[in-house]
Amino acid sequence: MSVNAKHLATFVLGAAAGASLYKYLQTEEGEKMLEDLKTKASNLRDEAEGAVDKAPEYFEQLKTKGADALKGNFPDAEQMLRDLMDKFTGKKTGPTVEPNP
C-alpha cells in the first residue's frame, strides 16, 4: 500500500486538529467544557441504566395490555390465529378459549 499526498495531508491535518484540541483543553474554558461533558455523560449513563432496569416491567405491561386490548376489540382473534397455525403446521395447537361475554 503506497502513501500518497492525500494520505499524508490527512495525517498532518488530523495531527494538527489533535494538537489544537489538546491545547484548547488545557485552558480554563476547555477544562470547564470537559467537566460539563463528564456530567452529561454520567447523567446519560444513569438514565440508560434506569431504562434497562424498567424495560422488563414495561414490556410485560405492554404484553398484558396489548393482549387485553386485542381480546376486547377482536374476541375471535385468538381462535383465528390458532386456526392459522393449525393450517401452517398441520397440528392442533390446543383447546380453544371461549371469549367472556
Image: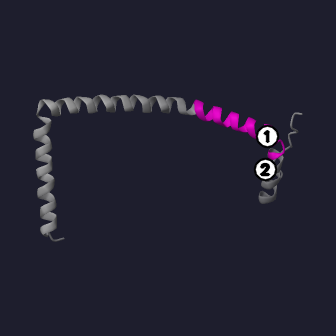
Q: Which residues are magenta?
A: 57-77
Residue 88 magenta: no
Q: Residue at x 16, y 67 (%)?
A: 6
Q: Earlier in the sequence, mark 2 or mark 1?
A: 1
Q: Where's residue 71, x and y in %?
A: 79, 39
Q: Residues within 10 Å of mark 2 (few under 14, many from 20)?
A: few
**7 or 53, nearer to the observer:** 7
Q: Quadrant of the N terminus?
A: bottom left
Q: Residue at x 10, y 40 (%)?
A: 23
Name the element at disc 2: helix
Say if mark 2 contacts mark 1, CB within 8 Å: no
Q: Where's residue 34, x and y in %?
A: 22, 33
Count of labels in the image: 2
Residue 73: image tag: 1
Q: Where's residue 11, x and y in %?
A: 14, 58
Residue 63 magenta: yes
Label 2: which residue? 81
- Horizontal side of 25 relative to 60 (left or right) equals left
Amino acid carrying label 1: it is Asn
Q: Quadrant of residue 101?
A: top right
